[in-house]
Image (cartoon, rainbow, N blue to C red):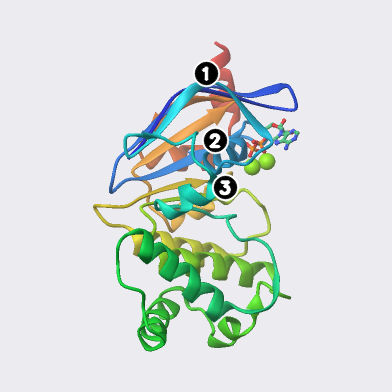
Amino acid sequence: MLKIKDLYASVEGMEILKGINLEVKPGEVHAIMGPNGSGKSTLANVLAGKEEYEITHGEVFYEGADLLDKSPEDRAKEGIFLSFQYPVEIPGVPMVNFLKTSVNEHRKHKGLKELTAGEFLKLMREKMDMVDMHAKLTNRSVNEGFSGGEKKKNEIFQMALLEPKLAILDETDSGLDIDALKTVANGVNALKSPERATIVVTHYQRLLDYIVPDFVHILYQGKIVKTAGKELAHQLEEKGYDWIKSEIEN
Ligand code: ADP
Ligand code: MG
Ligand code: MG
């Protein structure tokens, strides 16, 4: 589904990613962890297609095609969801309208029939239960005046509605309380299927108490220095990141 080959990326002339290799297959959940400043968000941003990052070497394939060539919009249409896709506030546009439009755009791209208002409401109710989203939020304008936790819920709710093939969630922003962590985890767990995959970028092991990853990768100084199963996250919780650093330096 996703294949990253020897990827190097810079920002403002500074090399941040220094040879990332990663393969994600359908059905898998990958966690990317690592100390602050190691390049986790840079990797997520590069996959999202953010402009300020320059790819200096390497390739990324998504479903066999060159991902780096595609616009962020095309990446989204082709089934990639990025957690920071719609962080903006859109005054005057109720969430429910925004979501219906975006679900129908995705359906059109997949060659599916557009949902009627009634069909969309039914789908929305189903997904709302899943992430414990309050109906009052969907009637408000997009993200306008939402608290941090509400924005997070909203984002995961969008993900649940769009049912992306590949979800990439950058959860490094601190300040996620237990409720928000559970929301993220419920969304990721509900999305799990043999056709879909998720990459969760997180500094904290805590999130992985609720999401069970198939693989945990440690990103350190722009490289993936260790890959293992979910037990690696627990090791990190016990021992912190220092042992990784000394393991690498020796
Ligand atoms: P992580 O998410 O692992 O904490 P980041 O990818 O956010 O790491 O950052 C890696 C390094 O790249 C840091 O030194 C950070 O300051 C730098 N960096 C990331 N994005 C930018 C940017 N837009 N402008 C300047 N420096 C950046
Ligand atoms: Mg950081
Ligand atoms: Mg980060």
Name the mark nearer the viewer: 3 or 1: 3
Left or right: residue 176 versus residue 250 is right
State the residue at coordinates (53%, 30%): 219
Total numbered labels placed on residues in the image: 3
Q: In this view, does 71 lie above or below 104?
A: above
Query: Whole-percent x and y of residue 236?
Result: 51, 38
Is the C-beta separation of discs 2 and 3 under 8 Å? no
Q: SS at mark 3?
A: loop
State the residue at coordinates (45%, 34%): 217
The residues tagged by marks 1 and 2 sit, at their Cα atoms, a distance apart of 12 Å
Q: SS at mark 1?
A: helix
Q: Is residue 31 above or below residue 180?
A: above
Q: Mark 1 — residue? A: 247
Q: Mark 3 — residue? A: 204
Q: SS at mark 2?
A: helix
The quadrant where residue 67 appears: top left
The quadrant where residue 185 appears: bottom left
Query: Whole-percent x and y of residue 121?
Result: 41, 85
Residue nearest the viewer, comparing 148 with 25:
25
Q: What residue type is labelled 2?
A: Lys
State the residue at coordinates (36%, 74%): 114
Q: Which amino acid does label 1 sit on?
A: Glu
Screen quadrant of the C terminus: top right
The label on residue 49 is none
The residues tagged by marks 2 and 3 sit, at their Cα atoms, a distance apart of 13 Å
Q: Is mark 3 within 8 Å of ligand 3?
A: no
Q: Mark 2 — residue? A: 239
